[in-house]
Image: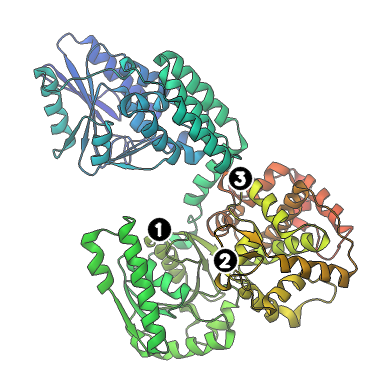
């Protein structure tokens, strides 16, 4: 019989089978919670029932919370209360898990008295990725089943645990090959016969392991000092050695402590933004075929793009100009695939087929039958226009011609062909087979079906595709070029590169801008500054003096062993000769250096980033603030817990940002300008979040 639209109960002799059917992922909605609560109560009240088993229809058990309820007032029954009722059932309760049982889904199962997993099952407690902790008993019941160290690792990593490992750990009691309903019936019969022994998790006592918890807390103070939820996870897991009722009370308070932090709001914004960013009209259209891909250039970027396409199951033709370069590119790709195999990103049974899907060529003519060409050569307009002119004659009708350009005018590249409607920018980020951002740059004449294909490719490659208009640097690099000047100005005015890096790492960036420059190669930005030099306004304060002189010495960062830092030892130390260069450049400019506080470094850097991002919105290069947030999060290392620069800007407010810019403009009125959109927002009292709706 149906309890409600998503929960039903079936009686087989003395067994109650409770089926959850809330497609597509059986989310723990209010209807599912209420139906399950009623079904358990009904089975307990029926004197003919001796055991009950909960299973799910469709492709998965409860995959997690219902995201439609995020940010809304809670509705009864609350998940923690429901799980407590399941655990407190007078009759044994079995949970049969298949597909994915994550977050609240796994917590429901933990409240049962016995868990059966089906082959292919993945379980996990991913709440930490949202700035939270498992708040429905996960921090209390998991340690009782698998011990504190294993439970803490699961909770802090938020990783998915496969069926075999879950069985080995003790998260599940049995692994079955049967369909969910059959597995439920078998397990129920085995409980009745005594072949399986159910047990209440709240009756299991956890041995305190304060030494491990203390060690983890000390480690987190080094690695995640600026985050809240990891420390609260440790606090809650520590309470698992208390009686269940007391431990749940500690967990609940820790959960609410996390809920009330800006970090949780930032992570939730990032979570929803990642899903909403592809919600553009073109992405809903039918894409063109892209089963066969050509990649031009076997360097770091080209080999990474080819690797990403191969891992996605696509056929790839790699084109280089010399046999030596081609061999080097293929070798790099094969090493990437070997690494993917070792890390479990590529299954052994698909390894050979994936490697065999790659072929190489020395002539562009080999691309005459591919569906999509991605050009990834030297960042030079003449070179790119020449290649696209040749592709125009070689490639079949309907083939998409894409450029991986980071800065150059896509419309000028497209004009070198007779089919500008087939040209698009696909800006990957290095390493291309690892970094998740893909800027989909839409030219003035790019056909909507080509844009749709860009988004379909991003999805196939498991990347975050973001639509961008055409300008120098598109969304990300245009903003980067602006705020990076602030870092240079800060150094010229008195800060050291290390002070700038430390301040921004304290804000949450994994690496400061000077470390990032050393990692990427300082010569890349040097070439960009040289390219822009003829058009640089006279009134602009030049920011490249120090970096230019470093590059003139052949110090390009890690790849040459020297940059802002030295790389000839295990310990990262500043390059002492850079300090001499900075001193000389200050003297040339007549600057008397002044100490710069870490807070001022962060404020100026972030204000510059936000200011240029607003200009990107004004120019319609990005359609929405969330597009900018996703670009900076997934391509530029912006701290995820801060949600992105536009989300972070809302925590400051338009009026406060204007006050900052006007204060800084007293020193440099050319660089610091208040965008008109920001003034409008201050007058109207609106936020960037309002523009995402």
- The extreme front residue here reads 569
Q: Secondary structure at mark 3?
A: helix
Task: Measuring from the top left, give residue 538's x and y in whole percent.
Answer: 84, 77
Q: Which residue is mark 3?
A: 642
Residue 483 pos. (x, y %): 70, 61
Of residues 190 and 600, the one nearer the viewer is 600
Q: Is residue 32 above or below residue 378?
A: above
148 lies left or right of 260: left
Marks 2 and 1 close (CB-CB < 8 Å): no
Pointer 1: residues within 10 angstroms few (<14), some, or many (20+)? some
Q: Is residue 618 left or right of residue 8?
A: right
Gap in Å between the C-alphas at discs 1 and 3?
23 Å
Q: Which residue is mark 2?
A: 568
Mark 3 and mark 2 in contact (Cβ < 8 Å)?
Answer: no
Q: Position of residue 650 (x, y in %)?
A: 68, 44
Which disc is residue 274 wearing? none
Q: Earlier in the sequence, mark 1 or mark 3?
A: 1
Asked which secondary structure carries label 1, the reply is loop
The kind of secondary structure element at disc 2 is loop
**Would you call the spot at circle 3 few (<14 residues within 10 Å), some (14-19), or many (20 or more)?**
many
Q: In this figure, which residue is indicated by the disc labeled 1?
A: 462
Q: Position of residue 365 (x, y in %)?
A: 36, 90
Location of residue 484 by image quarter: bottom right
Question: Which quadrant is home to the N terminus?
Answer: top left
Observer able to see residue 287: no
């Amino acid at each position: 019989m149906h309890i409600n639209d998503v929960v039903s109960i079936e009686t087989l002799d003395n067994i109650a089978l409770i089926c959850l059917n809330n497609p597509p992922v059986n989310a723990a909605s209010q209807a599912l919670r209420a139906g399950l609560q009623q079904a358990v109560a009904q089975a307990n009240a029926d004197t003919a029932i001796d055991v009950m088993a909960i299973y799910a229809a469709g492709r998965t058990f409860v995959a997690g919370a219902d995201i439609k309820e995020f940010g809304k007032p809670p509705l009864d029954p609350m998940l923690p209360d429901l799980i407590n009722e399941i655990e407190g059932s007078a009759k044994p309760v079995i949970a049969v898990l298949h597909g994915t049982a994550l977050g609240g889904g796994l917590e429901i199962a933990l409240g049962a008295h016995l868990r059966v997993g089906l082959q292919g099952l993945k379980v996990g407690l991913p709440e930490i990725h949202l700035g939270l902790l498992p708040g429905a008993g996960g921090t209390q019941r998991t340690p009782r089943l698998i011990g504190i160290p294993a439970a803490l690792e699961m909770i802090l990593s938020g990783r998915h645990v496969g069926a075999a490992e879950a069985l080995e750990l003790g998260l599940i009691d049995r692994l079955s090959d049967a369909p969910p309903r059959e597995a439920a019936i078998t397990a129920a019969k085995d409980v009745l016969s005594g072949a399986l022994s159910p047990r209440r998790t709240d009756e299991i006592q956890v041995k305190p392991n304060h030494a491990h918890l203390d060690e983890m807390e000390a480690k987190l103070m080094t690695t995640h000092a600026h985050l809240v939820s990891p420390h609260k996870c440790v606090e809650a897991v520590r309470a698992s050695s208390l009686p269940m009722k007391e431990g749940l009370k500690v967990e609940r308070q820790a959960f609410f402590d996390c809920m009330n932090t800006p970090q949780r709001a930032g992570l939730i914004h990032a979570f929803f933004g990642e899903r909403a960013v592809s919600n553009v009209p073109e992405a809903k259209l039918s894409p063109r075929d892209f089963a066969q891909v050509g990649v031009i250039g076997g360097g770091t970027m080209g080999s990474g793009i080819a690797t990403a396409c191969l891992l996605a199951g696509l056929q790839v033709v790699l084109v280089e100009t010399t046999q030596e370069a081609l061999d080097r590119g293929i070798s790099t790709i094969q090493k990437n695939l070997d690494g993917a195999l070792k890390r479990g990103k590529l299954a052994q049974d698909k390894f050979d087929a994936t490697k065999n899907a790659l072929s190489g060529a020395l002539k562009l003519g080999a691309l005459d039958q591919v569906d999509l060409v991605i050009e990834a050569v030297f960042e030079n307009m003449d070179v790119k226009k020449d290649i696209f002119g040749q592709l125009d004659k070689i490639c079949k009708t309907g083939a998409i011609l894409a450029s991986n350009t980071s800065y150059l005018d896509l419309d000028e590249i497209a004009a070198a062909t007779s089919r500008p409607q087939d040209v698009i920018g696909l800006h990957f980020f290095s390493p291309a087979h690892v970094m998740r951002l893909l800027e989909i740059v839409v030219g003035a004449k790019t056909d909507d079906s080509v844009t749709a294909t860009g988004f379909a490719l991003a999805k196939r490659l498991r990347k975050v595709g973001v639509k961008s208009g055409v300008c120098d640097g598109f969304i990300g690099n245009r903003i980067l070029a602006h705020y990076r000047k602030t870092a240079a100005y800060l150094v010229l005015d008195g800060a050291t590169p290390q002070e700038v890096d430390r301040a921004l790492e304290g804000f949450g960036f994994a690496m400061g801008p000077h470390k990032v420059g050393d990692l990427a190669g300082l010569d890349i930005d040097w070439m960009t500054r040289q390219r822009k030099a003829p058009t640089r306004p006279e009134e602009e304060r030049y920011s490249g003096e120090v970096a230019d002189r470093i590059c003139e010495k052949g110090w390009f960062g890690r790849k040459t062993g020297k940059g802002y830092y030295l790389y000839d030892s295990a310990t990262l130390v500043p390059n002492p000769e850079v300090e001499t260069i900075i001193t000389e450049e200050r003297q040339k400019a007549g600057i008397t250096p002044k100490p710069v506080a870490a807070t001022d470094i962060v404020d100026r850097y972030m204000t510059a980033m936000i200011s240029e991002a607003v200009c990107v919105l004004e120019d319609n290069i990005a359609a929405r603030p969330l597009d900018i947030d996703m670009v900076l999060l997934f391509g530029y290392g912006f701290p995820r817990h801060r949600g992105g620069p536009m989300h972070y800007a809302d925590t400051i407010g338009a009026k406060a940002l204007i006050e900052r810019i006007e204060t800084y403009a007293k020193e440099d009125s050319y660089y610091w300008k208040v965008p008109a959109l920001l003034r409008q927002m201050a007058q109207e009292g609106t936020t960037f979040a309002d523009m995402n709706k």
